[in-house]
Image: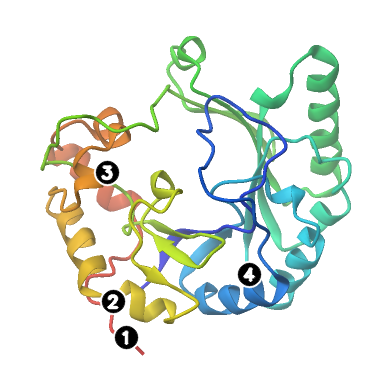
Amino acid sequence: MRFKKIYLEITTNCNKNCDFCGGTTRKGEFLSTENFENRLKQVANLGERIYLYLAGEPLLHPNFADFLKIAETHGVSIGVATNGLLLEKQFYALLSPALAELNISLHSAENSEEYEKLTNLALSLAEKRADLTINFRIWNDENLTKIGAQKRKIADNIFLHFAAPFSWGKNAEAQTNGFCYGLQSHFGILCDGSVVPCCICKNGEIVLGNINEKNITQILSSPRTKAIAGGFSRRVLVEEVCQKCEFIRQKFGASTSSATGFAIEQERGTSILNAKPN
């Protein structure tokens, strides 16, 4: 049982209010160091990379540098997405060898001076960390996505990544046919311990269990989790939240062709359908 990505949220707090993000309705919270290490140990061997966000700005966490040191101790590959406003403050923490991927949203820059500062800091990081992949993200911009590619290489370890606009909202009408990478290539753990199938559920719309109450293997092996994952594999949307998910409609449409199905099989991680509890 191995996933491409596991989202381990460390805070729900953020220092920006970007339109494309969607925010969260949950209370402001910082994950404790003890809970971070306990959760990291549980998921370390389940994912190719652990991403320290779902909602919130990870660089805002007062123990962010300590978290990277803990990840380094356990040999875990870490990914981070940030609005970039705290790159300078966390610059030396970001030099940690545990950090393998840094995604920077260019939407946070409100003027040319901020944009220049953000990009220069990222370039300085790239010079000091040739092994660190840096993605500049421009999402939900219709004009930029018309050029026909989702990712363009700027330098050896720096890329420009953009995606078409999408909605975090729900559709009034349910559909039962569709697909999602949730529980196929990734899942998430919210600050309060709730385990969710994807980032669209960052407000806890679907909670599969709580890692404070059960270990992650038990949660991923539960009947509900298997039903959701099995439904995605058959192109069937089991949960009402999934049936009304606007992102699923925009990303995959109401049905999935065999060609797209093959691409999905190539993209997703190992299925959890045969997972057994400890």
Amino acid type at circle 1 is: Pro
Alpha-carbon span between mark 4 and mark 1: 23 Å
Q: Earlier in the sequence, mark 4 or mark 1?
A: 4
Alpha-carbon span between mark 4 and mark 3: 27 Å
Above or below, 240 against 29 in this view is above
- Tell me the quarter of the image containing the C terminus: bottom left
Give the labeled residue for mark 2.
221
Of helix, strand and loop, which one carries label 1?
loop
Of helix, strand and loop, which one carries label 2?
loop
Alpha-carbon span between mark 2 and mark 1: 6 Å
- The nearer-to-camera label among 4 and 1 is 1
- The nearer-to-camera label among 3 and 1 is 1
Quadrant position of residue 15: top right
Give residue 76's mark: 4
Q: Earlier in the sequence, mark 4 or mark 3?
A: 4
Above or below, 164 against 274 in this view is above
Determine contact: label 2, label 1, CB under 8 Å. Answer: yes
Query: Dot 2: few (<14), some (14–19), or many (≥20) neighbours within 10 Å?
Result: some
